[in-house]
């Protein structure tokens, strides 16, 4: 996949900006708080209608405005013949536009090639992107929700049905939790000899609870089975990536922690039966709690390196390397499953990687379109001594890069490199002197 054009209106610190993008590597250079990350955020927004930094659309609106609009035009690999790449005139471009407004009513609309999409699930899988940012280390440090989100977003890009199952699960979970609260309150009324307690209504609510529990267990069984299959793939690719990053010194293992008594290796029917048994055993506890104590909404991944749980005993370097390995696995799985190369978004991460990790990362996306942000080109090219200019000079960029002895630059020789200067919410094409 290749992004051709990005349009922003009232998005973060951009009033109105159109950025023409070429294939290969695109480097956005600028000081902090100028809007570099916002560009990558806008691209990633078009994969799942969700920012990687916030879950609130209001946060994405420029100060003083009451709406934002993000639009990308991209070329999909599915229209490109394997034996003969299409010319610029032959290329078939698709378009995704996301709009959010607060006035006169709160409304968010998603358009694909001009057609309004009724559900977020209709967007999932149309455009693929993988983002690697400094805050991704929180995959290790934060609670289970962060690791579930990583897993769910990856699978959803590949399996739209999985995303729909996640939505159904949340609906069923909400219904079951509401019933549990009602039953808890009715039990309290019974203990207090309250005349409001009606045994017939209580039995009816118990029957409803059984129905919603069955619905929840069926969807949960599908989710657990699918998660387990992709966790195996993630582990396989991430093990190989980490072995390269660490020169074979570190061994990664991923444990899938799901509902006690449930074996994710079983088929969905067996998982369903195990879940029903578990739900029945914990029903009274759930009623007293007023919520569902166990379920796939509490799943977690244990990331272990050399028999040490990374979250508790992993060093900063080990944690960063493990996250990098997970992202490389994500990139590979999406490409293998969809036969399309995802766009790779690297948000100010090069300066935090040593030469070995940086080299491995750059060598992993031979033909992917890449977006990189940095405050100084020296963070990407340590031997860089030149300057950027808004006017093209007769010097040849490829020759300039070829002269560098740095191995990172050698890894980037396969593609054309485009430079952009970002300053106070404006983006301008630059050329290397």
Image: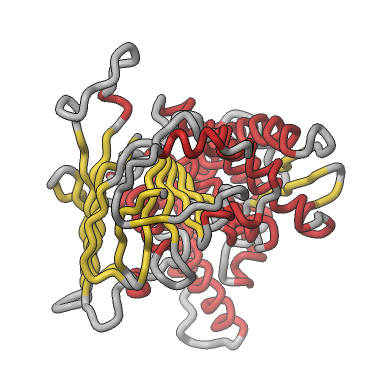
Quarter occupied by residue 232: top right
Question: 342 or 400, which is in the foreground?
Answer: 400
State which quarter of the image contains the N terminus.
Answer: top left
Seen at 43% across and 69% down, the residue is 201
Residue 152 in view (yes/no): yes
Question: 295 or 72, which is in the foreground?
Answer: 72
Q: Is residue 209 above or below residue 186?
A: above
Q: Looking at this rendering, what residue extends furthest in the right direction?
A: 307
Q: Is residue 240 above or below residue 64?
A: above
Whether residue 284 sits left or right of residue 412 in the image: it is right
Q: How many numbered marks are there?
A: 0
Question: 219 or 280, which is in the foreground?
Answer: 219
On the image, the x and y values in percent for residue 188 come to 58, 81
On the image, the x and y values in percent for residue 114 come to 13, 47
On the image, the x and y values in percent for residue 345 come to 46, 48
Q: Looking at this rendering, what residue extends furthest in the top direction?
A: 83
Q: How is the image coloured?
A: secondary structure
On the image, the x and y values in percent for residue 75 come to 27, 34
Seen at 41% across and 25% down, the residue is 339
Q: Looking at this rendering, what residue extends furthest in the front direction?
A: 394
Q: Is residue 131 above or below residue 414?
A: below
Residue 295 in view (yes/no): no
Question: 121 or 218, which is in the foreground?
Answer: 121
Whether residue 417 sits left or right of residue 237 in the image: it is left
């Amino acid at each position: 996949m290749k992004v051709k054009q990005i349009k922003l209106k009232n998005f973060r610190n951009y009033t109105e900006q159109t950025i023409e993008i070429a294939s290969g590597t695109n480097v956005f250079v600028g000081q902090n708080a100028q809007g570099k990350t916002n560009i990558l955020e806008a691209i990633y927004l078009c994969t799942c209608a969700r920012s990687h930094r916030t879950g609130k659309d209001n946060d994405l609106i420029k100060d003083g405005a009451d709406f934002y609009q993000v639009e990308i035009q991209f070329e999909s690999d599915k229209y490109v013949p394997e034996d003969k790449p299409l010319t610029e005139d032959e290329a078939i471009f698709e378009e995704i536009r996301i709009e959010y407004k607060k006035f006169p009513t709160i409304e968010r609309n998603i358009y694909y090639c001009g057609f309004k999409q009724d559900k977020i699930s209709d967007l999932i899988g149309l455009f693929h992107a993988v983002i690697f940012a400094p805050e991704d280390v929180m995959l290790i440090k934060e609670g289970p929700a962060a690791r579930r989100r990583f897993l769910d977003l990856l699978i959803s890009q590949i399996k739209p049905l999985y995303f729909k199952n996640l939505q159904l699960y949340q609906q069923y979970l909400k219904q079951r939790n509401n019933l549990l609260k009602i039953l808890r309150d009715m039990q309290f009324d019974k203990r207090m000899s309250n005349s409001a307690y009606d045994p017939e209504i209580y039995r009816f609510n118990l029957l409803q609870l059984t129905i919603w529990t069955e619905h929840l267990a069926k969807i949960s069984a599908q989710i657990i089975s699918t998660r387990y299959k992709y966790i195996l793939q993630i582990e396989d690719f991430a093990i190989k990536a980490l072995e390269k990053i660490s020169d074979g010194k570190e061994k990664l293992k991923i444990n899938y922690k799901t509902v006690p008594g449930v074996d994710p290796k079983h088929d969905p029917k067996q998982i369903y039966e195990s879940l029903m048994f578990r739900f029945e055993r914990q029903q009274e506890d759930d009623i007293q709690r007023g919520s569902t104590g166990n379920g796939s909404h509490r799943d977690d991944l244990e990331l272990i390196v050399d028999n040490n749980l990374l979250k508790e005993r992993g060093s900063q370097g080990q944690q960063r390397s493990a996250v990098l390995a997970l992202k490389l696995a994500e990139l590979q799985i999406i490409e293998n499953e969809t036969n399309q190369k995802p766009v790779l978004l690297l948000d100010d991460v090069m300066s935090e990687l040593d030469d070995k990790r940086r080299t491995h990362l750059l060598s992993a996306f031979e033909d992917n379109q890449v977006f990189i942000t940095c405050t100084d080109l020296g963070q990407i090219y340590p031997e860089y001594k030149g300057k950027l200019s808004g006017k093209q000079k007769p010097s040849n960029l490829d020759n300039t890069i070829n002269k560098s002895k740095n191995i990172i630059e050698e890894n980037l020789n396969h593609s054309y490199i485009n430079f952009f200067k970002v300053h106070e919410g404006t983006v301008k094409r630059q050329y290397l002197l």
